Amino acid sequence: MAPSNQTGTPPRHPDFALAERCRRNEPGAFEELYRLHSPRLFGLTYRLVGPNEAEDLLQEIFLSAHRKMALYKGEAALGTWLFRLGTNQCLDYLRSKRARLMLLTDAIDQDAPAAPAASGAVLSVVERMDLERAIDQLPGGARAVFVLHDVEGCEHREVAQYLRITEGTSKSQLHKARMRLRAALASGGKRRNDHDDLQGR
């Protein structure tokens, strides 16, 4: 059993020291924060809002983090706090472009062609570039659920909180997104095979 401190409050996460350095504007502190956490946050912005806006939105996320650093209390990892901040900023951006979850209620054809069941996770059986293109073709709501759950590892309850939907809707959107991805990736693979066959003639 971990000893409690004299005030009875839980100990702060070790990342709190870096946050404090950022708050004091110590030289190099915010650069360290950016170096540690920008790769994951860029991946998030790229998948949620697309390549054209990803870099600008990443900068906005870190500017927001700088302004709001006092809100980080060290109760969890700093990366977790930044991820939540970044996710909310991405979703606010999407809503501001009238994507409002038309994103979440975008029709995904119920009769989308089903590909043969993949063995293992989608992420492990396709080339990354093909997967990124397939994700980009998903309707906005399904894409957001897929990215948060399957790519970033959020639980359905977290996805539901981020997107302001029910857990049931999150699960339904994820299932439909996976089916769409499998169909799209299978179709792409068939096209590549047909092309290779033609080249081999």
Image (cartoon, rainbow, N blue to C red):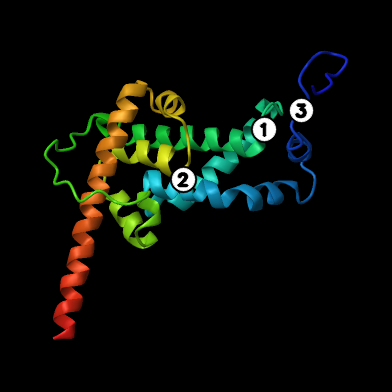
**Residue placed at 25% from the left, 48% from the top?**
117
Q: Which residue is mark 1?
A: 69
C-alpha distance separating marks 1 and 2 = 20 Å
Residue found at the far left of this picture: 111
- Percent across and percent down for residue 122 are 35, 51
Q: In the picture, which quadrant includes the N terminus?
A: top right
Q: Answer yes or no: do the residues labelled 1 and 3 have beta carbons within 8 Å?
A: no
Graded by Cα atoms within 10 Å as few (under 14), some (14 to 19) or many (20 or more), the crowding at tag 3 reads: few
Q: Amino acid at mark 3?
A: Arg
Graded by Cα atoms within 10 Å as few (under 14), some (14 to 19) or many (20 or more), the crowding at tag 1 reads: some
* Secondary element at tag 3: loop
- Percent across and percent down for residue 98 are 29, 33
Q: Amino acid at mark 1?
A: Met
Query: Horizontal placement of 102 versus 93: left or right?
Result: left
C-alpha distance separating marks 1 and 3 = 15 Å
**Residue placed at 58% from the left, 50% from the top?**
38
- Percent across and percent down for residue 51 are 39, 54
Give whichever of discs 2 and 3 has the lower sequence position: 3
Give residue 163's quadrant in the image.
top left
Query: Horizontal placement of 147 versus 62: left or right?
Result: left
Q: Which residue is mark 3?
A: 12
Q: Name the one closer to the observer, 74 or 176.
A: 176
C-alpha distance separating marks 2 and 3 = 26 Å
Q: Which residue is mark 2?
A: 44
Give residue 77's quadrant in the image.
top right
Q: In the rendered image, is residue 132 in sight? A: yes
**Mark toward the viewer: 1 or 3:** 3
Q: How many marks?
A: 3
**Mark toward the viewer: 1 or 2:** 2
